[in-house]
Image (cartoon, rainbow, N blue to C red):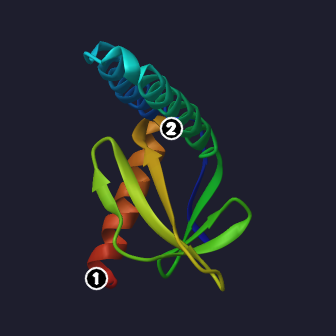
Amino acid sequence: MALWQSDLSVSWRAQWISLLFHGLLALLVLLMPWPINYTLLWMLLLLIVVFSCVRSQRRIHACQGTFKLLEDFRVYWKGHEWQMMRKPWIIDSGIMLKLKRQGQRGSLHLWLGADSIDSEEWRDLRRLLLQQQASGRE
């Protein structure tokens, strides 16, 4: 049974922060005084920054869909059940969850932006996670 459920949308704040970071990094690469024989190097660095920005935007867009908070620090996300590896990191603008899928190796960091959830649902999610932390494990 789900304690909380919502349809997550794209976090516009996360998109803007990513674009700002990558834009500043690209500007830094462009404005550095490169010697003429380093042209290929700075072009390669600029290409890496652009591809990193595209990858970041795709990852942000992938964080959409139905999200369910279950009992015992479990989450239902993207058609699978996940276990919270540690306490969620909760701030006013978002929640960072470290999740591990049942029977799988590796983990997933999932950022739930406050702007990707309705404000009332956001308050309920924060309250439930804080209650789980207080009554649950470290």
- Corner quadrant of residue 120: top left
- Corner quadrant of residue 106: bottom right
Distance between the alpha carbons at the discs numbered 2 and 1: 27 Å
Q: Residue at x 59, y 46 (%)?
A: 63
Describe the element under mark 1 as helix, strand or loop. Answer: loop
Q: Nearer the viewer, residue 97 or 120?
A: 97
Residue found at the far front of this picture: 37
In which quadrant of the rendered image does the N terminus lie? bottom right
**x%, y% of residue 18?**
42, 32
Q: Residue at x 62, y 38 (%)?
A: 58
- Corner quadrant of residue 113: top left
**x%, y% of residue 56?**
52, 38
Q: Amino acid at mark 2?
A: Ser
59 displayed left or right of 130:
right
Compared to residue 85, the image places residue 37 above or below, namely above
Q: Any mark on residue 112, and which?
A: none
In which quadrant of the rendered image does the C terminus lie? bottom left
**x%, y% of residue 83?**
53, 77
Residue found at the far right of this picture: 79
**x%, y% of residue 7?**
63, 46
Tag 1: Cα neighbours inside 10 Å, few (<14), some, or many (≥20)?
A: few
Q: Amino acid at mark 1?
A: Glu
Q: Nearer the viewer, residue 78 or 104?
A: 104
Q: Which residue is identified by label 2?
A: 116
Q: Residue at x 30, y 17 (%)?
A: 35
Q: Which residue is identified by label 1?
A: 138
Q: How many marks?
A: 2
